[in-house]
Amino acid sequence: MEETAFPKKIKVAFSLLMIIGAISFYLGWGLIYNAWNIFEPTNMGVYAIFVVMMAFGILGLMLTSRQQ
């Protein structure tokens, strides 16, 4: 198939970076503030950022693996 303008390796790297960033953000937040329950009403911002980053990372990996 024809090579795309945006290489597949960059898409996979960005998706993995989003997943690693989400996990690092959650762990960092938990260590700094000692707040491991992201479902508490005071931690909803952390939950929102974590879910969005994980969703983009997982969907990015799924889409790049499907483009074969």
Image: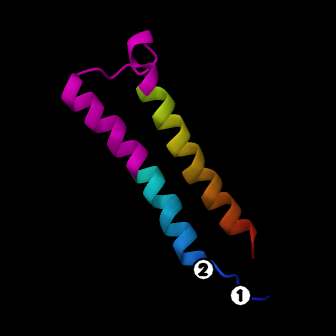
Give residue 40's quadrant in the image: top left
Residue located beneath label 1 in the image: 3
The disc label shown at residue 41, or none: none
Q: Amino acid at mark 2?
A: Pro
Q: What is the x, y in percent for residue 9?
A: 54, 76
Residue occupying the point 75% across, 71% down: 67
Residue closer to the observer: 5 or 9:
5
Q: Amino acid at mark 1?
A: Glu
Mark 1 lies on a secondary structure that is: loop
Q: Residue furthest right?
A: 1
CB atoms of marks 2 and 1 within 8 Å: yes
Q: Secondary structure at mark 2?
A: loop
- Left or right: residue 47 versus residue 33 is right
Q: Residue at x 46, y 36 (%)?
A: 50
Q: Is residue 42 above or below residue 24?
A: above
- Predominant SS of the magenta segment: helix
Please determine whether, in this image, residue 50 is positioned above or below residue 43: below
Location of the N terminus (image quadrant)? bottom right
Task: Identify residue for label 2.
Answer: 7
Work out which residue is located at the far bottom of the displayed protein and give it: 2
Q: What is the crowding at mark 2: few (fewer than 14 residues within 10 Å), some, or many (at least 20)?
A: few
Asked if the magenta segment contains residue 31, the reply would be yes
- Residue 3 drawn in magenta: no
Residue at x-position 62% and y-position 77%: 6
Query: Residue extending furthest top?
Result: 41
**What are the residue bounds of the magenta stretch?**
21-45
Quarter of the picture holding the C terminus: bottom right
